[in-house]
Amino acid sequence: MNTELQTATVCPQCGETLAKEDDVCPKCQTPEPQNDWEKERDRLKKLWVVAALFFWFSLFFQAGLFILDGTLNLIILSIILGTMVLGMILKIRLNLHIRKGPKTDG
């Protein structure tokens, strides 16, 4: 005879009764939402990657035009300079954000 008492737990997300060994019911097995720090880090990283890709695309486009035409296009040069500055600012903000991130003991 089994003398061990079966203790049922309740899912913290939906309130369903769970078996003893389960923490979350199968319906609610979604990952936790990211905290604000992680969301901001991901947003800054995506913006920095977009700026860097646009910089390199513009630079290679300008190089191709220079090879074909022999002159520099000042409008594209200003776009290249702007994306370079934007990329530097975003990278600095990303590094500062990572530096003040959550501390982990390990």
Image (cartoon, helix red, strand yellow):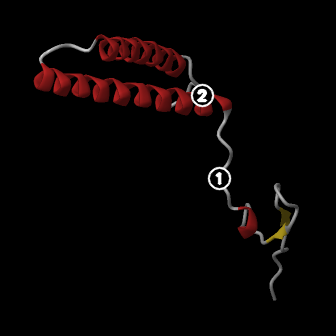
What residue sits 47% from the left and 29% below the top? 45
Residue 67 on image: x %, y % = 11, 24
Mark 2 or 1: in front is 2
Q: Is residue 45 above or below residue 86?
A: below
27 lies left or right of 88: right
Amino acid at circle 2: Glu
Q: For the point 40% across and 11% down, which residue is it?
A: 85
The answer to which quarter of the image holds residue 82 is top left
Q: Within 10 Å of the Cα at label 1, are there few (<14), some (14-19), or many (20+) other Cα atoms?
A: few
Q: Is residue 22 left or right of residue 45?
A: right
**What residue is at 56 percent from the left and 22 percent from the top?**
101
| Residue situated in front as seen by the camera: 87 or 82 | 82
Q: Looking at the picture, tell me which residue is in the foreground, 36 or 24.
A: 36
- Residue type highlighted by circle 1: Pro
| Residue appearing at x 60%, y 28% in the figure | 40
- Position of 43 with respect to 66 (left or right) is right
* Front-lying residue, 58 or 92: 58
Q: Secondary structure at mark 1?
A: loop
Which of the two residues, 36 or 7, is positioned nearer the viewer here? Answer: 36
Report the disc number at residue 41: none
Q: Which mark is residue 40?
A: 2
Point out residue 26 in the picture as x, y percentages from the top left corner: 71, 69
